[in-house]
């Protein structure tokens, strides 16, 4: 009879656990069977199981394109939770070290299996964090790498767990894609480590990373079914929902593609830049501020300056976290590859509206600055300090202007070099409100000009501004115009925007209000939009106006939308 | 013959900027309560039309939108023509397209196509025939790669369609839970062990 299955041994293990005598080794394990206190635990009653947790990363091919599943790289699963389980309970728990090693004390002669959770958690003294990888198509279950039950014996033993990629030589076997959650977590670990170089006591808000082999590109967001749009970060606000039927409150987190689709899909678990890019958005949401309105974006687009900065930040952060400026994203299952270079001129139109200009600027501030025209090498900490400081509190919209002006203010010794980097990207504005900017993507003929990017409006005054769809719709340059209003005293406002009466479809201006973050919006239909605000405290506000047909994301041909549309905006107060 | 247009849709992945724009972010202005004065009229048949939709920030993708159209309702055993139009944005110099099916359907026609010297806003068309072999929910997957300067950007689109009457799927069994009540999805490990 196997002693481990005897009634006695089961009762003993439970009793020991209940008495807390197993020294659950949350401190990293290691022994735990030495004498402590007046009633030392007999060494024979516990044994140490130690080992290493690893996962296989499928790397990009060194030559050619795509991932190379024939050359998996075994890497340590760092900082993750490892548990020793009996058939009915958790006997001990610890976390792996930076080499993936763990050590647990467990009852001797007991059936035990080792479980490695796709979760990095540290509580107590800062820094702290809680990152985990969940299956959004299976009730948000936490991925766990399970060994087999075996007798713990009467002496120390070793159990190593390795998470394989699930590649069988020609395709993925979804049930065996054990490496994916740990590869994702490993990228989060690298991103976290970069932040800790700047502030070693950082307290990271909890982050869920959702991955499923069913996660696929879609035009709606219903994570329960695997429809996640693309790999994306969502930070939901109260009242915001997904697109499921019925709709459900959104759950914050990074959603990552995983549907291989027989080689036709898009899988991102091994695309470290993609994951780190989205981690950058998590940092924006939780540590800084973003006024980005989201939406489709590509590095050739001429974007709303807020979108350009947010996405350029994500791109640049991915390179910084991985110390690799070549952004890579596998496609066509794993056979294809796209990307760009953060440290090179990608040949796209430059300006504050370009995420490529933003990422190249940020990367050049970060890197060693050895190439021509780049004398700046501030590394990450000054960037992070602006990110969590002035960028969070700026009264302007978040953009390369707000960020760079603060960076210069904080690093005066590098001001000339930073300014040179901005000018190289055709960014000439010298303050948070783009004062002095001369690059408006050629849109400079009155009245349909984008100059200035921020138009000053005063209480009791009115101005005319014009929007355009020349560069696309929804989130592109010129779809929305910005007006700066400085309120000397607290008051409520009536903001009125009246569009041109001519042209089809009829003009339909909308109004948004920002004040160190989004405040509210008025989106009635009609040529005249009237927005009555509540009482606003004294300070600087940004009034955003836009012609609806320039913003409307629905299936309206660009040619059927209004062309350049001017509107008169006035502000009165009481 | 009258064309039977079954589906015409845009899969522009509309990452939630989606017009709604009504995502309430934290009001950073102290002691200020501001509300939306009016909202676009909600459709009477959509009780959620006034609900906010969140902003998502997705990965960089190909600067291209896609439209598609089946020339007839897809039916088992009947080939149906699928027209795809890809519309690049500004800055795109070339466009590559790869089309793929899945189990249960077969595709006839060119599965890859490249366009050079493309112009922003112009539709670049791709045509193929889809033959459903059984009922179900299917996807034609289109991967578009745009060349922009020295960079390449990709985006995968799924064109969904239904053949016949599809029975609702059974709800999957609830996952097991760990000692803390957290649902857990066990994954297999390659385990090596040795006695001390």
Image (tube, coloured by chain):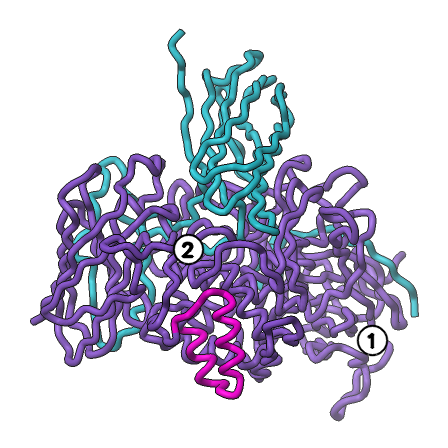
Chain colours: A purple, B cyan
**Residue at the image point whose x is 83% and y is 82% from the top:** A42
Q: How many marks?
A: 2
Q: Residue furthest top?
A: B1
- Is residue A423 part of the magenta span, yes or no? yes
Q: The numbered mark 2 sits on a residue in which chain? A: A
Corner quadrant of residue A22: bottom right
Locate residue A70 relative to residue A526 in the image: left or right. right
- Is residue A229 part of the magenta span, yes or no? no
Q: Which image quarter is the N terminus of chain B in?
A: top left
Residue denoted by label 1: A45
Q: Residues within 10 Å of mark 1 (few under 14, many from 20)?
A: some
Q: Is residue A224 visible?
A: no
Q: CA distance from mark 2 to mark 1?
A: 66 Å
Q: Nearer the viewer, residue A68 or A185?
A: A68
Magenta stretch, overall SS: helix
Q: Residue furthest bottom?
A: A38
- Using the image, determine if residue A526 lies above or below residue A520: above
Circles 2, 1 touching at the beta carbon (< 8 Å): no
Residue denoted by label 2: A303
Q: Position of residue A535 (x, y in %)?
A: 15, 72
Q: Which residues are magenta?
A: A402-429
**Residue at the image point whose x is 61% and y is 22% from the top:** B105
Locate residue A323 relative to residue A400 in the image: left or right. right
Q: Residues within 10 Å of mark 2 (few under 14, many from 20)?
A: many
Corner quadrant of residue B31: bottom left
**Residue at the image point whose x is 57% and y is 39% from the top:** B94
């Amino acid at each position: 009879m196997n002693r481990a299955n005897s009634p006695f041994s089961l009762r003993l293990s439970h009793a020991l656990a209940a008495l807390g005598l197993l020294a659950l080794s949350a401190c990293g394990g290691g022994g735990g069977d030495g004498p402590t206190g007046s009633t030392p635990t007999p060494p024979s009653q516990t044994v140490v199981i130690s080992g290493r947790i690893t996962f296989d990363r499928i790397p990009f091919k060194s030559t050619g394109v795509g991932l190379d599943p024939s050359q998996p790289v075994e890497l340590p699963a760092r900082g993750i939770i490892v548990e020793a389980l009996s058939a009915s309970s958790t006997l001990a728990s610890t976390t792996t070290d930076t080499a993936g090693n763990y050590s647990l004390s467990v009852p001797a002669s007991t059936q035990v299996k080792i479980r490695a959770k796709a979760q990095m958690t540290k509580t107590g003294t800062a820094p702290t964090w809680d990152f985990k990888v969940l299956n959004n198509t299976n009730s948000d279950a936490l991925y766990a790498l399970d060994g087999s039950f075996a007798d713990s014996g009467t002496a120390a033993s070793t159990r190593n767990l390795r998470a394989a990629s699930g590649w069988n030589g020609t395709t993925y076997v979804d049930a065996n894609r054990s490496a994916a959650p740990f590869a994702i977590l490993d990228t989060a670990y690298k991103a976290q480590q970069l932040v800790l170089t700047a502030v070693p006591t950082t307290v990271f808000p909890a982050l869920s990373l959702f991955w499923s082999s069913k996660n696929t590109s879609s035009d709606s967001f219903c994570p329960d079914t695997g429809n996640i749009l693309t790999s994306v970060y969502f930070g939901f606000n109260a009242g915001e929902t997904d697109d499921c039927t019925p709709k459900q409150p959104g759950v914050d987190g990074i959603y990552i593609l995983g549907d291989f689709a027989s080689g036709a899909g898009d899988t991102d678990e091994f695309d470290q830049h993609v994951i780190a890019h989205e981690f950058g958005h998590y940092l924006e949401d939780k540590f800084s501020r973003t006024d980005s309105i989201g939406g489709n974006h590509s590095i050739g687009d001429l974007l709303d300056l807020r979108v350009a900065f947010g996405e350029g930040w994500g791109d640049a952060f991915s390179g910084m976290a991985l110390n690799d400026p070549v952004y890579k994203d596998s496609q066509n299952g794993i056979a294809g590859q796209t990307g760009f270079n953060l440290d090179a001129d990608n040949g796209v139109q430059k300006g504050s509206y370009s995420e490529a200009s933003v990422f190249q600027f940020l990367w050049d501030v970060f890197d060693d600055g050895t190439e021509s025209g780049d004398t700046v090498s501030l590394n990450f900490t000054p960037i992070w300090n602006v990110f969590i400081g002035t960028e969070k509190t700026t009264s302007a919209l978040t953009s390369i202007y707000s960020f760079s002006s603060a960076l210069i203010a904080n690093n005066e010794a590098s001001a000339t070099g930073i300014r040179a980097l901005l000018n190289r990207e055709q960014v000439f504005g010298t303050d948070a409100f783009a004062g002095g900017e001369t690059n408006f993507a050629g849109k400079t003929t009155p009245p349909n000009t984008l100059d200035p990017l921020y138009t000053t409006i005063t209480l009791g005054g009115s101005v005319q501004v014009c929007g355009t769809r020349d560069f696309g719709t929804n989130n592109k340059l010129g779809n929305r115009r910005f007006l700066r209003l400085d309120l000397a005293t607290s008051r409520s406002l009536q903001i009125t925007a009246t569009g041109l009466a001519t042209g089809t479809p009829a003009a339909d201006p909308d109004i948004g209000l920002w004040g160190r973050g989004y405040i509210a919006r008025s989106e009635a239909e009609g040529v005249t939009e009237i927005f009555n605000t509540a009482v606003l405290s004294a300070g600087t506000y940004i009034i955003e106006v836009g012609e609806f047909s320039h913003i409307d994301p629905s299936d309206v041909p660009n040619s059927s939308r209004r062309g350049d549309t001017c509107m008169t905006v006035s502000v009165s107060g009481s | 013959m009258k064309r039977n247009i079954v589906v015409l849709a845009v899969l522009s992945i509309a990452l939630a900027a989606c017009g709604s724009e009504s995502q309430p972010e934290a009001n950073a202005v102290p002691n200020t309560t501001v509300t939306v004065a009016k909202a676009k009229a909600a459709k009477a048949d959509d009780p959620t039309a006034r609900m906010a939709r969140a902003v998502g920030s997705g990965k960089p993708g190909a600067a291209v939108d896609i439209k598609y159209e089946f020339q007839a309702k897809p039916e088992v055993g009947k080939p149906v023509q699928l027209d795809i139009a890809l519309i690049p944005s500004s800055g795109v110099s070339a466009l590559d397209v790869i089309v793929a099916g899945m189990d249960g359907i077969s595709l006839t026609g060119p599965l890859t196509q490249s366009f050079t010297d493309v112009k922003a806003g112009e539709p670049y068309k791709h045509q193929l025939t889809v033959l459903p072999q059984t009922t179900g929910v299917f996807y034609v997957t289109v991967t578009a790669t745009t060349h922009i300067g020295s960079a390449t950007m990709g985006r995968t689109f799924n064109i969904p369609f239904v053949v016949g009457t599809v029975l609702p799927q059974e709800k999957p069994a609830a996952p097991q839970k760990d000692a803390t009540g957290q649902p857990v999805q066990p994954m297999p490990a390659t385990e090596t062990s040795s006695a001390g």
